[in-house]
């Protein structure tokens, strides 16, 4: 019988993890696991618990929003021999669950978490040594994805919404940034940027599925200059949809990179996995290829 640590955030979403606790634990116990349950007590608790006792277990399962998953992954990264990770989504947006093809049903997600499915080797990022699992972003409308009604998310998508907002508000000020990545350099005025390893941000489709691989050691990077007009927005997004990374895509620059350094004369505020990630003049972001093993609903990691 394998030993499983089940961490759940009782405040995520509408408290779904707590209300489904019996079903989830029963499902995992029936699958043959000896389950230890820990409700997280405060921000950062998941990381601390995993770091302190994680190596005593064969599998770590967390339930909550993307922030809970991010915290759990951060704790695992501090272990010499991190056990396999599994995730039961219970947040309001659940971007990682969408990317990892994890079911929305608590019972089905618990069955997957307890299964003998071969884990995927998952790339994890760090921003100035702070781990993130799916996105680091800066600039205008960085928070828009987390506060946008679902109908607008479905209609526009994340990048279209950001670019349209930038084009329509003349008072938004850009950052003049030098971006060094994998031996190359860009320097320009950017209103928005994201470094990610995901298909979804804030419940909005973000990057074409075929352009993202979760285990290749590369981030998908998008930088946005001020769009001149609606036509330029459309042309830039079409270039991305056609999966043609380019440094000359009009208002939108898209590329792949494993390591980046953003340098700006003034501090830039970042969000990582939807949470405040600090304010930095120099920001180093690195992809840690296949740093963790995670149970997913994706058989082929190229999907």
Image: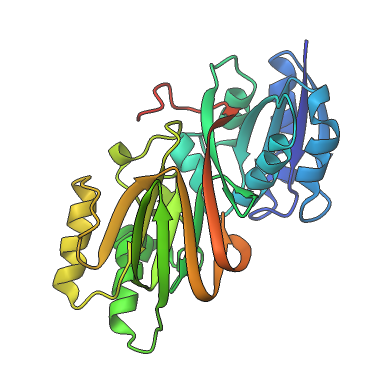
- Front residue of 259 and 108: 259
Please provide percent x and percent y for residue 268.
54, 72
Instruction: Give the side of residue 136 with respect to residue 131, left or right.
Output: left
Q: Is residue 74 above or below residue 146?
A: above
Q: Is residue 91 above or below residue 101?
A: below
Please provide percent x and percent y for residue 250.
20, 66
Please provide percent x and percent y for residue 99.
45, 40
Q: Quadrant of residue 7?
A: top right
Please provide percent x and percent y for residue 263.
49, 66
Instruction: Give the side of residue 265 with respect to residue 42, left or right.
Output: left
Count of residue discs: 0
- Front residue of 177 and 229: 177
Residue appearing at x 68%, y 36% in the figure: 77
Can the viewer see residue 277?
yes
Residue appearing at x 42%, y 49% in the figure: 200
Instruction: Give the side of residue 218 with respect to residue 246, left or right.
Output: right
Quadrant where the N terminus sits is top right
Quadrant where the C terminus sits is top left
Instruction: Give the side of residue 130 with respect to residue 259, left or right.
Output: right
Q: Quadrant of residue 76?
A: top right
Residue found at the far front of this picture: 183
Q: Is residue 193 above or below residue 258?
A: below
Can the viewer see residue 142?
no
Residue found at the far top of this picture: 1
Residue appearing at x 41%, y 56% in the figure: 180
């Amino acid at each position: 019988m394998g030993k499983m640590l089940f961490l759940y955030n009782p405040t995520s979403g509408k408290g779904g993890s707590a209300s489904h606790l019996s079903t989830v634990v029963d499902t995992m116990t029936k699958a043959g696991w000896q389950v230890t349950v820990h409700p997280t007590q405060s921000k950062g608790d998941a990381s601390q618990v995993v770091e302190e006792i994680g190596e005593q277990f064969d599998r770590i399962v967390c339930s909550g929003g993307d922030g809970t998953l991010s915290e759990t992954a951060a704790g695992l990264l501090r272990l010499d021999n991190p056990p396999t990770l599994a995730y039961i989504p219970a947040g309001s947006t659940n971007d990682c669950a969408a990317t990892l093809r994890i079911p929305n049903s608590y019972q089905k997600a618990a069955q997957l978490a307890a299964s003998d499915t071969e884990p995927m080797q998952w790339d994890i990022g760090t921003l100035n040594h702070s781990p993130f699992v799916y996105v680091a972003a800066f600039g205008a409308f960085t928070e828009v994805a987390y506060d946008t009604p679902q109908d607008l998310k479905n209609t526009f998508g994340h990048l279209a919404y950001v670019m349209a907002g930038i084009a329509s508000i003349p008072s938004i000020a850009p950052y003049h940034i030098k971006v060094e990545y994998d031996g190359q350099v860009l320097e320009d005025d950017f209103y928005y940027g994201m470094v990610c390893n995901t298909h979804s941000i804030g419940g909005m489709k973000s990057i074409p599925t075929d352009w993202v691989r979760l285990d290749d050691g590369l981030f998908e990077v998008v930088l946005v200059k001020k769009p001149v007009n609606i036509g330029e927005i459309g042309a830039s997004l079409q270039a991305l949809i056609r999966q043609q990374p380019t440094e000359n895509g009009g208002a939108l620059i898209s590329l792949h990179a494993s390591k980046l350094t953003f340098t700006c004369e003034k501090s830039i505020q970042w969000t990582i996995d939807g949470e405040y990630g600090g304010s930095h003049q120099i920001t180093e972001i690195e992809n840690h290829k296949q740093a963790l093993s995670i149970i997913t609903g994706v058989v082929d990691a190229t999907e």
